[in-house]
Amino acid sequence: MATKVKAKTRKAVAARFKISGTGKLMHWGAGKSHILTKKSRKRKNRIAKVKELASNLAATYKRMIRGV
């Protein structure tokens, strides 16, 4: 009897995205770690907010997180 291969989560994707309560993939903006003096306050605030991932990528990344 053959055993079923266990599905594994892609840890890199799981660390960068989270699934919201409604099932959307959320991510944080890049560019908030260094060289902040030349960036405006408005730009830094916009980077810091959690954003929804584009729908064309969401299905692929969800499969990676769920390990399918």
Image: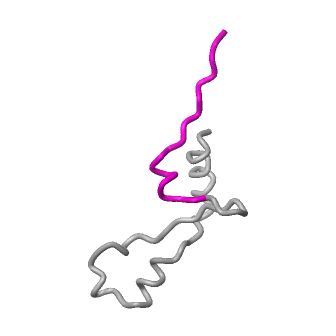
User: In the image, is residue 15 part of the stretch drawn in magenta?
Assistant: yes
- Rendered location of residue 28, percent (x, y): 49, 69
- Rendered location of residue 62, percent (x, y): 61, 51
Residue drawn 72% across the image and 63% down it: 22
Label count reads 0
Image quadrant in which the C terminus is located: top right
Start and end of the magenta stretch? 1-18
Residue drawn 50% across the image and 44% down it: 10
Colouring method of the image: one colour
In this rendering, the answer to whether 41 lies above or below 22 is: below
Residue drawn 33% across the image and 72% down it: 33
In this rendering, the answer to whether 51 lies above or below 62 is: below
Horizontal relation, residue 28 to residue 24: left or right: left
Q: Nearer the viewer, residue 42 or 56?
A: 42
Name the outermost residue toward the right.
Answer: 22
Residue drawn 59% across the image and 29% down it: 6
In this rendering, the answer to whether 8 lies above or below 15 is: above
Name the outermost residue toward the top.
Answer: 1
- Rendered location of residue 11, percent (x, y): 47, 46
User: In the image, is residue 30 part of the stretch drawn in magenta?
Assistant: no
Name the outermost residue toward the bottom.
Answer: 41
- Rendered location of residue 65, percent (x, y): 57, 48
**Residue 1 falls in which quadrant of the image?**
top right
Horizontal relation, residue 10 to residue 54: left or right: left
